[in-house]
Amino acid sequence: MEESFSRNRALRRESVRTAGVTKVYGQGGAEVHALRGVDVGFGAGEFTAIMGPSGSGKSTLLHCLAGLDAVTSGAVWLGDIEITALTDRELTKLRREHIGFIFQSFNLLPTLTARENILLPLEIAGRRPDPRLVERVVERVRLADRLGHRPSELSGGQQQRVAVARALVSRPEVIFADEPTGNLDSNSGTDLLEFLRVSVDEFGQTIIMVTHDPHAASYADRVVFVRDGQFVHELDRPTADTVLDTMKKLEG
């Protein structure tokens, strides 16, 4: 498996990669080793899912990859930039200009309309939106008739679609998604996953998603499995069945 992983990694143009990443919470007898020397890469223009048993470190890994949490040791690169060497100010700028986020809590501002929420990151960064891209994204996520509505006037699925559109219109180098279907019903969740798939296939977006759902993972190009804070396995062209079988083995 290690030889196969090394060969695949050598052939893959990586958007994000790690080297020996560890994350330790607490001190002394209260230490918790959430990540234990993780070496893994994520292909540019690919949809990658991160999976693992509860407490495996998958969400911690995502947060370290996105610069939302500092590593204890090791390094994380976004393209050619070592984000673990940046100051807090530089890291904030990098996240604003190069990274998009989709979380299960949506994180929309309640006083802004859907359109205003979508364009907010560009406004904060002082960048002008590309009208054609905005129109294309809005059409793809089926929000054209809801742009004037505030979050309280939208369903959960529509709110999550606003969050997806917000992440896409700034053309980030990579989008990180943390359990994005967690608060959605099955139909809305499937819609969201199809939108993510489209963003990779039609927009060339790089997406890294943490999920516990084999169905959600089946939309990815590749699944990376984490157990006890370590990278342990990967699947290319996953199906819900192959993901479920792998998870059963890991949990066993």
Image (cartoon, rainbow, N blue to C red):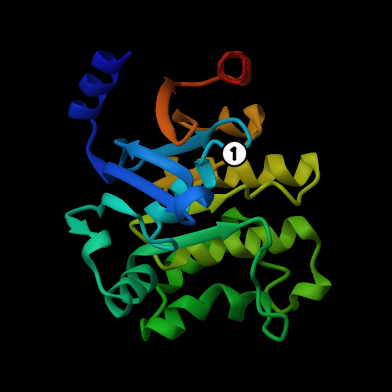
Front position in the image: 188 or 240: 240
| Image point (35%, 46%), residue name | 22
- Residue situated furthest front in the rendering: 29
Q: Secondary structure at mark 1?
A: loop
| Image point (60%, 81%), residue name | 116
* Residue 214 picture location, percent across and down: 63, 27
Q: Mark 1 belongs to which amino acid?
A: Gly
Relative vertical location of residue 59 with respect to residue 119 in this rendering, above or below: above
| Image point (43%, 78%), residue name | 122
* Residue 15 picture location, percent across and down: 28, 47
Which residue position is annotated with label 1? Answer: 55
* Image quadrant in which the C terminus is located: top right
Q: Where, by quadrant of the figure, is residue 126 drawn?
A: bottom left
* Image quadrant in which the N terminus is located: top left
Q: Is residue 205 visible?
A: no
Q: Where, by quadrant of the figure, is residue 97 drawn?
A: bottom left
Relative vertical location of residue 248 with respect to residue 227 in this rendering, above or below: above
